[in-house]
Image (tube, rainbow, N blue to C red):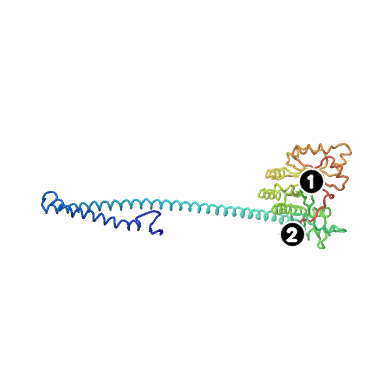
Amino acid sequence: MRAGSGRIVSAPDAGFTTQDFAMAVPVQLLIFLSYTLAAAATPFALHFGLGGIDPNVAAMSGGLVWIAGVLLHEVAVRFRQQSHLTDEITLQRAAYDRVMGELDGARASLKLVQDALEAAAAKRNRVAQKEIRQVVDEVRVLKALVDQLASRRGAAAGWRGPAGRDLPAAISNRPAPPVARDMDDAQILDTVRDGLKADRVDLYLQPVVELPQRKRRFFECFSRIRTEDGEMITPAQYVAIAEREGLISAIDNMLLFRCVQLVRKTRQRRFNLGFFCNISRHTLADPDFFSEFVQFMANNQELADSLIFEFAQPDLDAIEESVAFELDRLAGYGFRYSLDRVDGVELDPADLAARNIGFVKIGAAAMIDALHRGGLNPRALKMRLEAHNIALIVDKVESEPDLIELLDFEIEYGQGYLFGEPRLGREP
């Protein structure tokens, strides 16, 4: 209902209004008086004006005139009411159609909101499922590490595994702790075991720079083990002993797993960096663990742009067919490989590309020695590798003179203590 300007209607411009009624009453009264007067005048006109028609007949004629007037008046009134009713119905239908249109629009808007809410809920569910899957995958890999340690002599007692703290995602400004000296094999073994128990296996990062600007483009990941006194022992000190005691595989695999966690956290902070993570011969020799790890990486394919797995050339040459299959599968997910500890400068880029190698690291001393002996053109080697989408990195660059000599041949990437020593990682 709407009230305004003296009108009471159920829809805009609809119905018989109060003004209409106010105007209709005098008109109807006037019409009534008109045909009543006509009916009253008819007997006189018939009796006196037409030459003496019988008074009864004249009176009856007047009555018929009045009845005819009443009937015509009734017909006219009902016709007008019918017209008003038809107009009212038309307006009501128009109002109904308009309301239904608005209702349909509201339903459509509600459907859009409902679809948006369902899409948001589905997205949240997908994200939650992905996070759950990542946690499950990490637990599975950690379980494999625990099983490895438990199966190694002397390693199971009291080992708790990683403490679950956040892993580093950038180079720390703190200087590295001093290297522990004058330790015999028994002390080093105790340090390794205690380091595993107390989660003192740290991740160190060394930059790989773009030349000649020396802009950091990648980091290579290394492991160091801290002593209880805060010093550290390096791989050169503990690798042989850990291998003999059956601990090295678990240490290497833990480092590999932490590299993956580091890359994930770095990507969350939108750092555009790449990380070289070494896969040792011990990991390659453990097909069960490596298969689990490949499946783990299959569920983390978004890390492929930031994570490069690195192999020593002798280790890669000695892999079994089953491991080669897993490496092909891992490369199929978009992950790239780097070849380290190259034993010579005579390389077959086509063969390397077929094995999904994207980076080759050659020591600065080996490059310069071959150059001086006339057996190497670094620029030609670089071009041959780049023709197969393989980048050349000269590592172990220790002095400015060596760097200047290499820059003459447009070497693109360099690594070594000249550009930065391995530093303890931390979150940015």
Q: Secondary structure at mark 1?
A: strand
Spot occupied by residue 423 in the image (x, y as percentages of width and height): 80, 55
Badge 2 crowding class, 10 Å Cα cut-off, few under 14, some 14 to 19, many 20 or more, is some
Q: Using the image, tell me which numbered label, if any, was put on residue 156.
A: 2
- Going from N to C along the chain, the mark reached first, 2 or 1, is 2
On screen, residue 227 above or below 274: below
Q: Is residue 118 left or right of residue 253?
A: left
In which quarter of the view is residue 390 placed?
A: top right
**Which residue is rendered at x = 77% and y = 46% of the image?**
311
Q: Position of residue 384 (x, y in %)?
A: 78, 37
Quadrant of the image occupied by residue 117: bottom right
- Residue under label 1, please give it: 210
Q: Amino acid at mark 1?
A: Glu
| Amino acid type at mark 2 | Ala
- For the N terminus, the quadrant is bottom left
Depth order, front residue of 374/155: 374
**Residue pictured at 10% horizontal, 52% vertical:** 54
Q: Secondary structure at mark 2?
A: loop
In this rendering, which labeled residue sits more in front, label 2 or label 1?
A: 1
Number of marks in the image?
Answer: 2
- Residue 128 appears in which quarter of the rendering? bottom right
State the image coordinates of residue 428 (x, y, percent, origin top left). Answer: 74, 56
Q: Which mark is residue 29?
A: none
Q: Nearer the viewer, residue 160 or 410?
A: 410
How far apart in space, not on screen, are marks 2 and 1 (Cα)? 43 Å
